[in-house]
């Protein structure tokens, strides 16, 4: 199972690179345009993804920044946001390299941002959520780009595996 999660960490980095490459081609107005995604714009959705990853990584590792609001805007500037995204993706991959199967089975206890009270669950399902959450909101990024009449992104896992991710096959 650990190899599966490491693959998702590598895929996550690859897919984020694809989204940020297209975002870099947008005008600032397009980047900030509310196109009906859950967080509105590409700017706010990409910020949310970084916010959520930081929250989960703080829960998992006990280190790093953990914003207190899911809609926090950590970076107004795309370049700064992209740089922070790269650092977080590498942090996730490096942390994954410290895990073993016993760590995946161990309990993780945390307090959700959205409700009071502690939750305890094995690390593996929480980690699955981290990567699934990324995929969910990257889909909204794709929808936002489509609404802006921009070229479609290819973010499918199989394309990652056929290119950079061939080591995971």
Image (tube, rainbow, N blue to C red):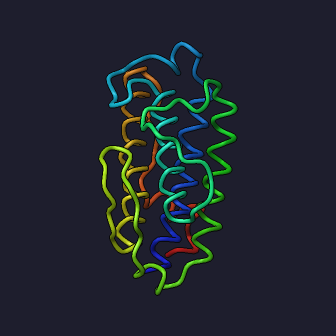
In this view, 21 is above or below 10? above
**Picture quadrant where residue 141 is located:** top left
Q: In terms of depth relative to the viewer, which is nearer, 155 or 55? A: 55
Residue 80 in percent (x, y) is at: 69, 33
Query: As drawn, which residue projects farthest toward the top?
Result: 29
Q: In terms of depth relative to the viewer, which is nearer, 167 or 1? A: 1
Give me the residue at 62% from left, 44% from top.
85
In this view, 78 is above or below 9? above
Q: In terms of depth relative to the viewer, which is nearer, 102 or 67? A: 67
Residue 122 in percent (x, y) is at: 36, 74
- The answer to whether residue 20 is left or right of residue 130 is right
Residue 96 in percent (x, y) is at: 57, 71
Query: As drawn, which residue projects farthest toward the bottom?
Result: 102
Check the picture and name the quadrant holding the N terminus. bottom left
Give me the residue at 63% from left, 35% from top.
81
- The answer to whether residue 10 is left or right of residue 159 is right
Count of all numbered marks drawn on residues in the image: 0
Give me the residue at 40% from left, 61% from top.
110
- The answer to whether residue 150 is left or right of residue 14 is left
Residue 124 in percent (x, y) is at: 39, 73
């Amino acid at each position: 199972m650990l190899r599966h999660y490491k693959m998702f960490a590598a895929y996550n980095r690859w897919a984020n690179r694809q989204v940020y490459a297209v975002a870099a081609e947008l005008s600032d107005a397009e980047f900030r345009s509310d196109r009906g995604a859950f967080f509105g714009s590409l700017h706010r959705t990409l910020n949310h993804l970084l916010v959520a990853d930081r929250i989960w990584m703080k829960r998992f590792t006990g280190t790093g920044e953990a914003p207190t609001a899911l809609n926090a805007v950590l970076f107004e500037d795309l370049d700064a946001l992209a740089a922070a995204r790269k650092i977080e993706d590498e942090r996730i991959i490096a942390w994954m390299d410290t895990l073993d199967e016993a760590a995946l089975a161990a309990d993780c206890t945390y307090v959700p941002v959205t409700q009071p009270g502690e939750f305890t669950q094995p690390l593996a399902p929480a980690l699955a959520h981290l990567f699934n959450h990324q995929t969910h909101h990257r889909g909204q990024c794709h929808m936002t780009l489509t609404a802006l009449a921009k070229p479609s992104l290819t973010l499918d896992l199989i394309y990652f595996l056929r290119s950079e991710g061939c080591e995971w096959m």
